[in-house]
Image (cartoon, grey):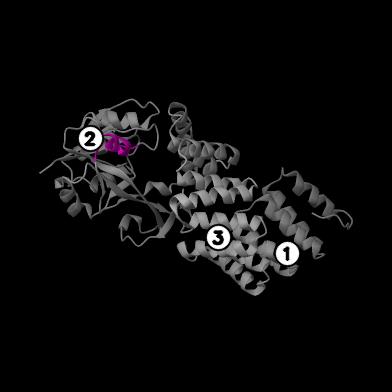
């Protein structure tokens, strides 16, 4: 029977490591823990599970750290997971069979990244409802699924590459190896970390991605990854666009890079150029929810509301009952004169995802455009009561009430906004205008 080792790199994982090792301990012949400088009880936990522990330096390079750990392994196969992950029960039956097979040198293992909302996505992966039955993840409503090579033969030519988002996948291909898909998943619990931890992780990975691009400037995937960090985490769309353009230049058939180039161009106010890039993405990798939604956004900006409506409806065939897309479709329907259907769709989207401020704004926008100011005021007040606050929401709500000649209510809203955002000059100026004699100036 071929042997397999669990190979891990860890640091300060005392709290999450027990569940991880408990899920693997009976399935591997060896547990190799490479510690990069833990100050808590991580190593004590590891040794309790019979792990062989080695200390390695952290050099801002995940591939180098994993390869240092790999050097210590002596088994036929290597399985790698992280401390905030757990192996699924299906691995008990699947793993021995995969190890005996001569048909593969590496296996893509599905990874389930659990999230707190069904209405988020990671890169271009949509969220799926959590029906896995995995008890430790029961509290999460959904997960995002993707796959990476987590199980591979130990051979001299197979090692990790990439300072961040590291993988053995390229080396297996370069050495003529064959890859198959495993029929068991890895559950990633730590993906749904809190805001402060997520901010620190995002910055950490962003800095590593910058170094990765500097070291491998001809790697289109590295440019895409850095662009996604700019796009998703820092909203620096100009920098993101430069990365996506470079990725497409290096790899003209890179469909995902063309997709994000299109999405970024639209965000920067270039809908016609956005449609061209999205069409290129479609020709390379076919239809998808993100692509259809991006086309809808670009058509909407070009005031082609019928084309936008068709694109949003196509996006919903991939993501049924996705409130953000439902609200965009509702706004397009209002613009096309389908007022009742559009407003009903917009209201339903708000009910289904009340924490999403953009969905509230679309309903408010539709009501204002239709001159339904009472309904717009109600929608703006509702947003302030349920969605995360921001200065613009207070200004918008106060403006609508002022147009309804409800100056006292508008002043109260601005006063509440100033309590949360006392240094926002526009809030201060508008409040002073309302506190003075009546005027026709707009907020």
Marks 1/2: CA–CA distance: 62 Å
Residue 335 is a magenta residue: no
Which of the two residues, 366 or 435, is positioned nearer the viewer here? Answer: 366
Residue at 47% x, 51% y is 283
Which of the two residues, 320 or 83, is positioned nearer the viewer here? Answer: 320
Q: Where does the magenta region start and end?
A: 167-177
Q: Position of residue 286 (x, y in %)?
A: 45, 54
Could you tell me if residue 409 is visible in this image? Answer: no
350 over 172 or under it: above or below: below
Q: Position of residue 78 (x, y in %)?
A: 22, 39
Q: Earlier in the sequence, mark 1 or mark 2?
A: 2
Observer-side mark, 1 or 2, equals: 1
188 over 369 or under it: above or below: above
Marks 3/2: CA–CA distance: 45 Å
Q: Which residue is mark 3?
A: 324
Q: Position of residue 34 (x, y in %)?
A: 28, 32
Residue at 63% x, 50% y is 272
Residue at 52% x, 40% y is 244
Q: Secondary structure at mark 1?
A: helix
Q: Earlier in the sequence, mark 3 or mark 2?
A: 2
Q: Secondary structure at mark 2?
A: strand
Pick the quarter of the image with the C terminus: bottom right
Observer-side mark, 3 or 2, equals: 3
Q: Which residue is mark 1?
A: 368
Q: Which residue is mark 2?
A: 32
Quarter where residue 398 is shown: bottom right
């Amino acid at each position: 029977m071929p042997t397999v080792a669990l190979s891990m790199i860890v640091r300060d994982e005392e709290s999450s490591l027990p569940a991880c090792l408990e899920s693997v301990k009976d399935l591997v012949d060896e547990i190799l823990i490479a510690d990069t400088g833990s100050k808590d009880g991580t190593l004590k936990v590891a040794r309790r599970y019979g792990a062989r522990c080695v200390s390695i330096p952290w050099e801002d390079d995940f591939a180098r750290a994993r390869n240092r750990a790999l050097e210590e392994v002596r088994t036929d196969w290597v399985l790698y997971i992280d401390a905030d992950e757990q192996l699924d029960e299906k691995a008990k039956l699947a793993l021995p069979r995969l190890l005996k097979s001569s048909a593969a040198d590496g296996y893509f293992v599905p990874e389930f990244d659990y999230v707190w909302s069904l209405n988020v996505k990671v890169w271009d992966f949509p969220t799926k409802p959590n029906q896995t039955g995995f008890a430790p993840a029961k509290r999460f409503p959904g997960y995002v699924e993707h796959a990476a090579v987590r199980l591979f033969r130990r051979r001299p030519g197979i090692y990790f590459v990439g300072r961040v988002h590291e993988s053995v996948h390229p080396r297996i291909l370069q050495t003529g190896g064959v890859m198959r898909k495993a029929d068991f998943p890895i559950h990633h619990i730590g993906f749904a970390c809190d805001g402060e931890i997520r901010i620190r992780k995002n910055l950490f990975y962003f800095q590593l991605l910058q170094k990765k691009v500097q070291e491998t400037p001809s790697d289109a995937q590295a440019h895409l990854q850095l662009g996604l960090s700019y796009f998703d985490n820092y909203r620096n769309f100009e920098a993101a666009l430069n990365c996506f353009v470079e990725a497409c230049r290096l790899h003209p058939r890179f469909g995902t890079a063309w997709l994000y180039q299109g999405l970024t161009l639209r965000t920067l106010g270039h809908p016609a150029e956005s449609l061209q890039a999205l069409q290129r993405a479609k020709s390379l990798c076919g239809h998808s929810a993100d692509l259809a939604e991006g086309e809808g956004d670009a058509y909407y900006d070009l005031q082609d509301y019928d084309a936008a409506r068709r694109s949003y409806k196509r996006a919903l065939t991939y993501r049924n009952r996705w409130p953000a897309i439902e609200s965009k479709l509702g706004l397009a329907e209002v613009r096309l004169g389908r007022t009742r259907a559009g407003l009903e769709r917009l209201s339903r989207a708000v009910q289904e995802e009340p924490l999403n401020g953009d969905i509230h704004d679309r309903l408010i926008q539709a009501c204002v455009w239709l001159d339904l100011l009472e309904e717009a005021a109600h929608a703006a007040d509702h947003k302030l009561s349920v969605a995360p606050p921001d200065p613009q929401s207070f200004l918008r709500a106060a403006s609508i009430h002022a147009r309804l000649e409800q100056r006292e209510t508008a002043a109260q809203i601005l006063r509440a906004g100033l309590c949360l955002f006392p240094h926002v000059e526009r809030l201060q100026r508008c409040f002073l205008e309302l506190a003075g004699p009546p005027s026709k100036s707009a907020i």
